[in-house]
Amino acid sequence: MSALAHSPRRHAAPSPDALGTALAALAALVAVGLAAERTVPLGDGYTVAAALVFAAGAGLVVALAARALPGAFGAANRVTLVRGALTALVLALLSQQSSPRAAWFAVALALTALALDGVDGRLARRGGISSRFGARFDMETDALLILALAALAWRFDKAGAWVLAAGLMRYAFVAAARVWPALGAELPPSKRRQTACVVQIAALVVCIAPPIERAWSAAIALGALAALTASFAVDVAWLVRRSASTGTGRAVRPDEGPP
């Protein structure tokens, strides 16, 4: 959620809709975390860690939404914020010891977040309330979930440290755009990009599942990482071509977006 900081600057009070959703999601997170501490079981600090992660991210989102959104927070962003709470619960599992029950809990959380992925986009399109803020919020939430799952796959010894590349690729891309502004241009929507994201999340969920042996989980993670790398490569190549073409004065048509 941190990369949302590029929203337009505009002083405004936080939306009661956004603040109320964040508080409700935090309360639900605490309830789920406390229940997991007893039933999984998990360490006493698990819920606190998850709550702190979510509170920091949600606070940033609420503040940025106040400046970027002209109206209400909206149903689509509420769903994305719930996905953020689920992601915080996954991230907090990094503080726990590996166990089959902890792995199954991570799988359940990630599958719930994956099921909600796309719901927010459909709600935004159906209500005619799509926004750049909402699209970016959705994308950064996906990126954070991938990072959390990749780190868990490594933490639970289901793949080598190389699996972290799947979670760090988005952030490396953002960092590269700081050095090479051509990579910071806006990319048009892409089904290929959305599919690569869903495949990456699903593959990492499968890797974490206890019945999958390490050799298979590593192979699955490696295949998904290759697909994600190819997707990023397509976008980078398009951005480089776009920069070169606009530098020569040739306009880039909307239908010239990456496949």
Image: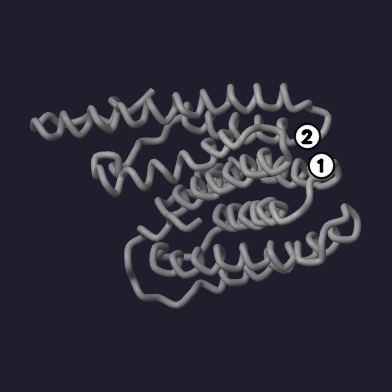
| Residue at 47% over, 58% down | 2
Whether residues under marks 2 and 1 lie with C-beta atoms below 8 angstroms apart, the answer is yes
Residue 24 lies left or right of residue 228; in this view the side is: right
| Residue at 16% over, 30% down | 244
Q: Which mark is residue 209?
A: 2
Please rate how many residues cluster around mark 1, counting C-alpha atoms within 10 Å: few if below 14, some from 14 to 19, many from 20: some
Q: Nearer the viewer, residue 41 or 8?
A: 41
Please rate how many residues cluster around mark 2, counting C-alpha atoms within 10 Å: few if below 14, some from 14 to 19, many from 20: many
Q: Residue furthest left?
A: 249
Q: Which residue is mark 1?
A: 104
Q: Nearer the viewer, residue 162 or 39?
A: 162
Q: Quadrant of residue 6?
A: bottom left
Q: Residue furthest right?
A: 39
Amino acid type, callout 1: Trp
Q: Position of residue 37 (x, y in %)?
A: 85, 60
Figure quadrant of the C terminus: top left
Q: Quadrant of residue 222?
A: top right
